[in-house]
Amino acid sequence: MHAWFTPCLALAPALSIGLAMAQPREPAPARASIERGRQLLAQYQCGSCHTIPGVPAARGEVAQTLRSWGRRNYIAGRLPNRGDLLARWIVDPPALVPGTAMPRMGVSPEQARAMAAYLLSLQ
């Protein structure tokens, strides 16, 4: 083994810990919040435009499907797909992406957090 390689091996655990810490994970939402989000997506008739698995009558074809939303990297092709940003997007899409076709629906921040929890649970 080369002399320079041994110190690199010693740094490997520290580097992997540092990388793990650089990507903070959001706490998993409670099952009740996820279910509430599903109900709210139906109540606000998000399925008029979007197809949303698990939401009755959510077979809209005007906007993109929300299938496997939890696997996506971006919201509206621009914003990182994180719970906090998704909730802000649901409350006021034009504030985050001016000119978007997605309207404000009068969703409260608390409701938006539950809706985001449901969408992010879709794998």
Image (cartoon, helix red, strand yellow):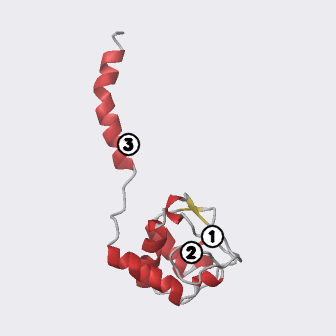
Residue, disc 1: 65
Amino acid at the residue labelled 1: Thr
Residue, disc 3: 19
Amino acid at the residue labelled 3: Leu
Tag 1 near tag 2, CB within 8 Å: yes
Sequence-earlier tag: 3 or 2: 3
Tell me the residue at 32%/23% (across/down): 9
Tag 3 near tag 2, CB within 8 Å: no
Image position of 104 (left or right of 14): right
User: Can residue 109 be seen from the camera position used here?
Assistant: no
**Cα separation between marks 1 and 3:** 32 Å
Specify the label residue 11 is tagged with. none
Image position of 31 (left or right of 121): left
Count neighbours of disc 3 (C-alpha within 10 A) and say few if under 14, some if 14 to 19, many if 20 or more: few
Residue 39, position as x, y percentages in the image: 46, 85
Q: Nearer the viewer, residue 81 or 46?
A: 46
Residue 43, position as x, y percentages in the image: 51, 90
**Cα separation between marks 1 and 2:** 6 Å
Image position of 6 (left or right of 122): left
- Judged from the image, the secondary structure of the residue bearing numbered disc 3 is helix
Q: Nearer the viewer, mark 3 or mark 2?
A: 2
Tell me the residue at 54%/83% (across/down): 56
Amino acid at the residue labelled 2: Ile
Residue, disc 2: 52
Q: Nearer the viewer, mark 1 or mark 3?
A: 1
